[in-house]
Image (tube, rainbow, N blue to C red):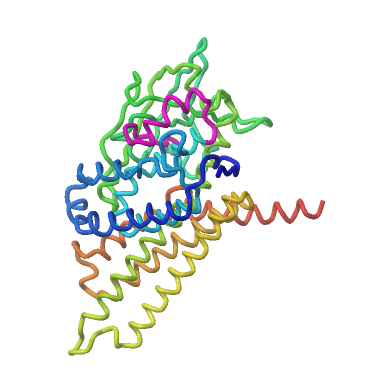
């Protein structure tokens, strides 16, 4: 059966097949990755054998259409997978997150046939790591402040600029690069997107960033100095596609990040319940104390609310009902929720929750980033509030 929902076009994965994919992913996460979280944290890298297993399972291309060698999951299925992936070190998901998400979806939704043929199979198999080069020192969640420039030179384009905090930059083969091709005007933002191979002359990747958390998920600065690319590198063959591609890709990514946050919050809750049931104070399990039960109740309620919200937002995306406000609402609530649940998890663990090598300490640091990338919580509030007001004004005319 074929479905068509905007940019999500392709063969639909049946409920039975998806249940199998989900079960395999869950087993992989819980039996292969969870026992090695400490190794990932200490060595600041995902072990090669786990990376290979993820490749073999098709995880580098789970959201890439089947015609390009991916699994072809739609967003409703994507978020179920993301909730499983969120249960362990977020570095695992980060390895293939940009392939399936913000970088890969720009190509799936907006690439020319030639661009799709050139890149998507490699992205789906994991042979190509695609990176989303949008954020800059002066332009974060709002791309309109972009300073990287692309200037036409004959039939080529020459790109100059500096990008910051680019996920998977140290291992990337392809940078989906956003650059200003003209000043913003009535016709659009003037932002174009280019497919820039990592080995192109003038592309330089900086040292790995030292982050608060998410060890093993690598980010770095990327600089473009007189990088020359052919006309065929312009995504969609049009300068005006870029900004829309970025906004659509980010909105979809927000629902995915929300689901990831739910998965991580579920893990923090499970760790809290297990600890409360076994740790004792004066010979009594701390879970027997009502104040601890109250914290567990708050965690459980938050996780359930987040799960319901993210499922609703994904369904609205797939059926085309809401691709703007719902993704931002899910991202805002779920990432803030994960922070609250992780904080309670540390509190329930007491002093041990503040110690390295304890899962909730890692989770507490890891989830802080979720409120920043794919648009900060503040940007989500502007999108939601501004969108509601705009809709009300339109309704009056």
Q: Residue at x 47, y 64 (%)?
A: 307
In the rendered image, the quadrant that contains the N terminus is top right
Tell me where residue 264 sits by quadrant: bottom left
Q: Using the image, determine if residue 167 lies above or below residue 128.
A: below
Q: Residue at x 65, y 30 (%)?
A: 185
**Residue 20: x percent and y percent?**
38, 54
- In this view of the protein, can residue 138 be seen by the observer? no
**Residue 189: x percent and y percent?**
60, 33
Q: Is residue 339 left or right of residue 14?
A: left
**Residue 93: x percent and y percent?**
34, 49
State how many labels appear.
Answer: 0
Q: Nearer the viewer, residue 94 or 17?
A: 17
Tell me where residue 263 sits by quadrant: bottom left
Tell me where residue 88 sits by quadrant: bottom left
**Residue 309: x percent and y percent?**
52, 63
Residue 384 drawn in magenta: no
Residue 119 drawn in magenta: yes
Q: Which residues are magenta?
A: 109-134
- In this view of the protein, can residue 72 be seen by the observer? yes
Residue farthest toward the right in the current orientation of the protein = 397
Q: Residue at x 76, y 51 (%)?
A: 394
Q: Using the image, determine if residue 310 lies above or below residue 131.
A: below
Q: Is residue 350 left or right of residue 103?
A: left
């Amino acid at each position: 059966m074929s479905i068509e929902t905007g940019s999500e076009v392709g063969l639909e994965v049946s409920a039975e097949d998806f249940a199998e994919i989900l079960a395999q992913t869950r087993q992989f996460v819980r039996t292969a990755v969870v026992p090695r979280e400490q190794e990932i944290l200490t060595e600041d890298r995902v072990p090669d054998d786990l990376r290979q297993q993820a490749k073999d399972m098709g995880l580098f291309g789970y959201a890439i259409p089947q015609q390009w060698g991916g699994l072809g999951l739609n967003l409703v299925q994507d978020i179920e997978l993301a909730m499983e992936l969120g249960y362990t070190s977020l570095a695992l998901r980060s390895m293939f997150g940009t392939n399936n998400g913000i970088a890969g979806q720009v190509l799936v939704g907006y690439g020319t046939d030639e661009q799709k043929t050139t890149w998507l199979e490699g992205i789906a198999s994991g042979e190509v790591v695609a990176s989303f080069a949008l954020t800059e020192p002066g332009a974060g969640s709002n791309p309109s402040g972009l300073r990287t420039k692309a200037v036409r030179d004959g039939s080529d384009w020459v790109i100059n600029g500096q990008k910051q905090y680019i996920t998977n930059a140290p291992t990337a083969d392809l940078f989906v690069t956003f650059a200003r091709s003209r000043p913003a005007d009535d016709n659009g933002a003037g932002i174009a997107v280019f497919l820039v191979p990592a080995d192109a002359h003038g592309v330089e990747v900086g040292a790995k960033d030292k982050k608060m958390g998410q060890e093993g998920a690598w980010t770095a600065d990327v600089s473009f100095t007189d990088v020359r690319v052919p006309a065929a590198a312009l995504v969609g063959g049009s300068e005006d596609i870029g900004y829309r591609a970025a906004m659509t890709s980010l909105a979809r990514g927000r629902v995915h990040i929300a689901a990831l946050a739910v998965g991580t919050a579920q893990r923090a809750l499970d760790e809290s319940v297990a600890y409360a049931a076994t740790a004792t104070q004066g010979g009594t399990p701390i879970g027997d104390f009502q104040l601890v039960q109250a914290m567990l109740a708050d965690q459980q309620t938050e996780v359930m609310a987040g799960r319901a919200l993210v499922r609703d937002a994904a369904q609205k995306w797939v059926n085309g009902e809401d691709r703007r406000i719902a993704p931002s609402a899910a991202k805002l609530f779920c990432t803030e929720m994960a922070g609250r649940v992780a904080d309670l998890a540390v509190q329930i663990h007491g002093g041990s929750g503040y110690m390295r090598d304890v899962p909730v300490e890692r989770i507490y640091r890891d989830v802080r980033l979720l409120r920043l990338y794919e648009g900060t919580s503040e940007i989500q509030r502007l999108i939601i509030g501004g969108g509601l007001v705009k809709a009300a004004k339109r309704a009056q005319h």
